[in-house]
Amino acid sequence: MEPYVIEMMKTARKPYEKVGTQEGDKVLIIADTRTDPIIWEVFGATARSLGAQPVIALMLASPRDYADPPTPVIKAAEESDILHYVTSRGLVHSRFGRKMSQAKKKRIISEGIYPRMLLEGAALANPEDILANVKKITPLWDQGESVRVTSPKGTGAFQGSHRAVSRGRGSLHAGGGLGGRRHCSRQSDPLPRRPLSSSHPANREKGTTCGN
């Protein structure tokens, strides 16, 4: 075992503790052929260390984001207590993902995760500090008339009316997931200026925007 795996497992405990993993819980970790194997190995070992019963579902990588997984994976998910998405492509906004959300399944969203994300960066942040920042930003977001998101280099990633994005799904979120490749949110007005890239037409819904 590589020594850095010990540090990865310390971080990997966080989302399982966040969703309240209990002894005997059936945990389905959904990975694909582009997921680094160390990812599902570490999460599987972590789930077992907490007394859960992890199962790894390894499927071929989907050709696009938000395509439904194969039927055997769907059936295994329906029988599981906790779902953990570590696929290279997005699942959470697929028809399957919405069905699991409606079923109130406990879910950990780590789509697009790679090993170093368990060793450095946001995954090591204190959740209480994150929540404190969210509470500071939320009033500004709600009361403001416009929003502009910029990169550390100062380039504009998004600009428009604050009414374009609500705090419902995916905008200001203080969840315990690790990873995350896309930002998806509900919109109450048509987005102004340039359009954002969106999900596959088969998965589009009126009022949903998924941008890189």
Image: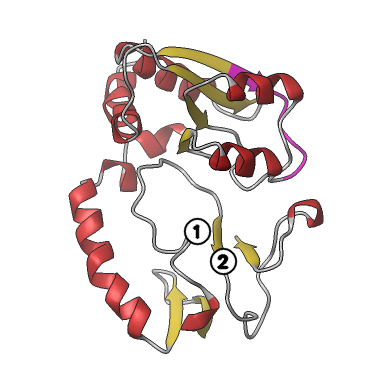
Position in image of residue 102 (x %, y %): 56, 42
Which one is nearer the viewer's eye here, 173 or 99?
99
> Does 61 appear in magenta?
yes
Task: Read off the magenta span.
Answer: 57-64
Residue indicated by mark 1: 169
| 75 on left or right of 187 | right
Horizontal and vertical percent position of residue 164 = 54, 78
**In front of the other: 112 or 74:** 74
Q: What kind of element bears circle 1?
A: loop
Dot 2 falls on a residue whose secondary structure is strand
Q: Amino acid at mark 2?
A: Arg
Q: Is residue 8 left or right of residue 185?
A: left
Residue at 62% x, 80% y: name it.
191
Q: Is residue 105 above or below residue 76?
A: below
> Does the segment drawn in magenta span residue 181?
no
How busy is the neighbourhood of tag 1: few (under 14 within 10 Å), some, or many (20 plus)? some
Q: Residue at x 47, y 63 (%)?
A: 168
Alpha-carbon distance for marks 2 and 1? 6 Å
Q: Which residue is mark 2?
A: 186
Residue 190 placement, left or right of 20: right
Q: Residue at x 30, y 36 (%)?
A: 18
